[in-house]
Amino acid sequence: MKALLICPSIRPAVPQLAEEGPLVTAPILGECLVCHWIEHLAARGAREIRIVASDRVDVVRAAVGSGSRWGVRLEVVSVSFEPTVAEAVATYRLRDETPVQWLPAPLDVVLMSHLPGCPDLPLFESYAGWFAALLAWMPQAITPVRIRVSELLPGVWVGRRARLSPQAQIVAPCWIGDQVFVEPGATVGPNAIVEDRAVVERAARVAQSWVGPDTLVGQMTSVSHSLAWGSSLTNWQTDSSLRVPDPFLLCSLARPLSALATGRPGSRPGSPARVTDTSLPPGAPFGWIAAPAGAAAPKLPRQANDPSL
């Protein structure tokens, strides 16, 4: 069966999400939007999927590859502007003379402005809408092919290579992605999403917020009701945004070491930044809690709603 996906172009309401790449490659719970859609359509019988893109097409191609990971054949088509669903149907489906059957509507031609199964939760009309859609999607994000993340406790999803300090507080509901570090005294949740390879340092707090991949939340930094990605911080309630100048508060870990400020408060001038790699050998400091495949859930700190507190 066939299907067609339309990539949304730039949306003025959410410029921060388009800084790192096309909107369909923005990270959502450990995977990008277009990959969530490909998996959804493949599970419903699609074997040929065409993706129509007008914004940074090469980035979209790199994100999806050949489609072999989903068992489908993919084609990414570059266009000069974003077509409507009706225009895409007329251009690609009605003119298709091959005998291969298309998926039934509305899965035959999809504008990827929402997550699968959530048409009433638009992603790109506001930052508040983006955050609400991700929170609603959390229970659905674990699928048979998502083996790197598991539900460690009710409402707490953790990547199997994440490292959580026993002295950290994890409050449901929350999502902690793969290869994430959460240091002693840090608090994650409630309603927090920390994407892959992020670091939440000592005494930092992330609540009612989304932290993008490869982002450092520094010591004693509080991220609340916000989207934090690299050094960009946006309050999803007010749409106010700023660029945090101090890399020890908030910064990207994906940049080369030379691009980061050296040292940290109280360190010697010229000393290297401490966080440069998200892999830890056995016996790493702070008694990190790993979540290996097949292992029992680690004992996490008591949650805020624990009656024994």
Image: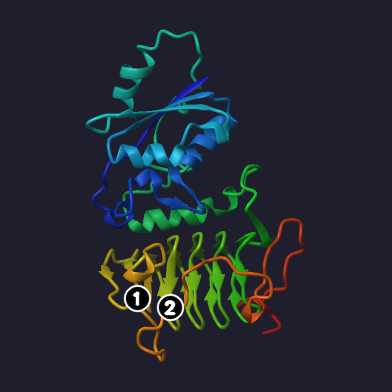
| Residue 113: percent from left, percent from top | 37, 41
**Badge 2: how crowded within 10 Å, few (<14), some, or many (20+)?**
many
Residue 119 visible in rendering: no
Residue 42: give its label.
none
| Residue 64: percent from left, percent from top | 45, 38
Toward which corner of the image does residue 110 lie, by quadrant? top left
Q: Is residue 149 above or below residue 259?
A: above
| Residue 160: percent from left, percent from top | 64, 59
| Viewer-closest of 197 and 4 | 197
Give SS at disc 1. loop
Tags 1 and 2 touching, CB below 8 Å: yes
- Disc 1 target residue: 247
Give SS at disc 2. loop
> Which residue is at 42% across, 58% downward?
131
Residue 93 visible in rendering: yes
Amino acid identity at mark 2: Gly
| Viewer-closest of 217 and 239 | 217
> Which residue is at 26% across, 45% downward?
10
Q: Residue furthest front?
A: 270
Please state, as top left, top right, bottom left or bottom right, where the C terminus lies in the image. Answer: bottom right
- Disc 2 target residue: 218
Toward which corner of the image does residue 91 lie, by quadrant? top left
